[in-house]
Amino acid sequence: MNAPTTISLADYERGKNDWPTPDARYLRSDLPAPPAIPLEDVFSPRWARWMRIAAEAKAAPPDYVMAAVLACCGSLIGNARWANPWQGWAEPPVLWAVAIGSPSMCKSPALDAVLNPLKQVERALRAPWESSMNEWHQRAEIAKLAETAWKDDVKAALKAGKQPPARPEGCDPGSEPKPIRLSVTDATVEKLALIVGNQPRGTLLARDELSGWLLGMSRYSGGGSDRPFWLEAYGGRSYTVERMGRDSVYIGHLTVGVVGGIQPDKLRTLLTGTDDDGLLARLIPIWPNAAPVKRPDTHFDEAFIQDAMHKLLSLQMPVDEEGAPRPWFVPFSEDAKGLLDQFREDVRQWEGEVEGLLLSFIGKLPGLAVRISLVLALMAYASGEASEPAEISIDHFGRAAHLIEAYLLPMARRAYADASVSTKDRSARSLVKLIISQEMRQFSTRDILRMDQKGLSTSSELNAVIKILEEADILRPAPSSSSPQGGRPPKVYHVNPALHGRKS
C-alpha cells in the first residue's frame, strides 16, 4: 500500500501559477471600519468639549465616554420625563450602551470617567438618608418598647375583664427611609425590583463586563428566565415580581438603563448563539478603534458632570389621580413630528437592505431616536446651555437622527458584521484562518477533525465547508491513494498558495 501523497515546498512553489485567484470573501473578516464620532454636531458645546477632554485624560476613544454619558444621563432623567411624539406613543429616556473592544482599549477607564462622578453624587445624596436612618432606628427601638408595653396592658385588661387600651401612636416608627441607588453593578431581578419599587425614577445597571449579565439571562430561577424582566425594564412598562413567601413587588414604570463593556469574541458568541427576541437589539454597540498610545497630559473637570447630574435629578415627577408618581410627557413640535416621519421612512428603506439581528436593531431606531432627542435636550438644560425644554424641537430630533444615521447605524453594521454571515460561511472563514495560522500547504480531513474546531468538528460540517472553499478556488483535492493500513484513504486537499503569499 502507498502512503498518502505529500507535496514538497518546491512543488508547492512551482504550482502557484496553476491556481486561479481565490475568492476574497473568505480571506477577510468583512469588518467595516468604525465611523467618526460626530460629537460637536450632536452635543451642546460644553458637553462635546467635556467628553473629548475626559477621553484624552483616560487615554481612551471618546466614543466610550459618549456611551457612558448617554446611558447615565438617560437613567438620571428616568421616569421624570418621557418623550411623547404624539398620542399613543411615549418613550422613556432609557438607553442601553455597550462598549466593545479588547482589554487594552481602556473601556473601563473611559466608563469610569462618568460612573465615578455618579458614585460621588450618590454618596452625597446618601448622607441625609443615613441621618434619617439613625433617627428612624431610634424611633423603631422606642416603638418596639411601646408595643411591648401596650401588649402587656392589653393582656392585663383582658384578664381583669376590662376594656383593652387602644394602640398608642408611639408604637409606629413610620416608614423606613429608602436609600438612593443611582447605579447597581449586579443584582438579582428580585433585588432590582425592590430598588426600583422604592425609587420610582429608575436606576442604572453599570457593569465592567456585560457578557455575564447577558449570559445570565438564560439561567432559570424561581419563575423562569430574567429576560422578560429586562425587556420590560427597557420599555418602562408596569411589572410585578412575585416573591416566594413574601409580598409581591409592583412597579408602575420599570426603567433600568444599562452600560458596560464586552470583548469582541464574547459579543460574537452572543450574537451568533442566541434567539432573536429583540433584547440584544436594544443595546447600542460602540466599537471604535483604539486611541493612540500616549501618556495623558490633561485633567477633566468632574465638577461639571456632577453639577449636571444634580440638575437632572432635580427634575421632579408629577403624581397621578391616586397620588402615585408618574412621568411628565414632553411633546414634539410640529416640525419635529415632520422630521420624525421622514426618519421613519428612511428606516423602512434601511430595513429592506438587511436581515437577521441587524434588521431587529434597525427596526428599533425610531424609538431610539425619540429617546436620544429627549436626552440631548435635557443634557443641554443640565449643563446650563438651555432652559428646560417644553417640547422636543426639530433641532433636538435632528441631532438625534444625525447621530443615528452618521454614527450608530454604521457602528451597528460593524458590530453585527459576523452575525450577518451564514453559519457555513463563518465556518469556512474559520478554516481559512486555521490554514493560514498553521501554514498548511495541504491537510487531510482527519487532521482537521482531530482539532475539534467549532463548526468543523463533524464530517458533515467539514465536508460542507470544504465544498464552499473548493468553489472559492481556495482548496483542491489531492490525488487519492490507499491508506497504509488498508481501507478508505484519508481525503487530502491542497491549499491555494495565494493564502501564504506573504510567507513564501
Image (cartoon, grey):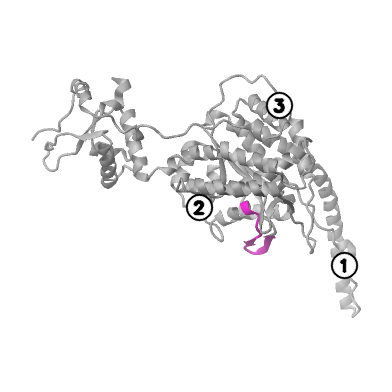
Query: Looking at the image, which residue is at 84% across and 58% down?
Result: 173
The quadrant holding residue 109 is top right
Q: How many residues crowd around disc 2 within 10 Å: few (fewer than 14), some, or many (20 or more)?
A: few
Quadrant assignment, res 19 = top left
Q: CA distance from mark 1 to mark 3?
A: 60 Å
| Residue 38 x %, y % | 61, 32
Residue type beneath disc 3 = Phe
**How many residues crowd around disc 1 within 10 Å: few (fewer than 14), some, or many (20 or more)?**
some
Amino acid residing under circle 1: Trp
Tag 2–tag 1 contact (CB < 8 Å): no
Identify the amino acid type marked 2.
Answer: Ser
What residue span does the magenta drawing correspond to?
Answer: 234-250
Residue beneath disc 1? 150
Dot 3: what SS? loop
Q: Reading the chain from its start, which is encountered first: label 1 or label 3?
A: 1
Q: CA distance from mark 2 to mark 1?
A: 51 Å
Secondary structure at badge 1 equals helix
In this image, 346 relative to 65: left or right? left
Which residue position is annotated with label 2? 218
Element at label 2: helix
Point 64% across, 37% down: residue? 68
95 vs 177, left or right, is left
Tag count in the figure? 3
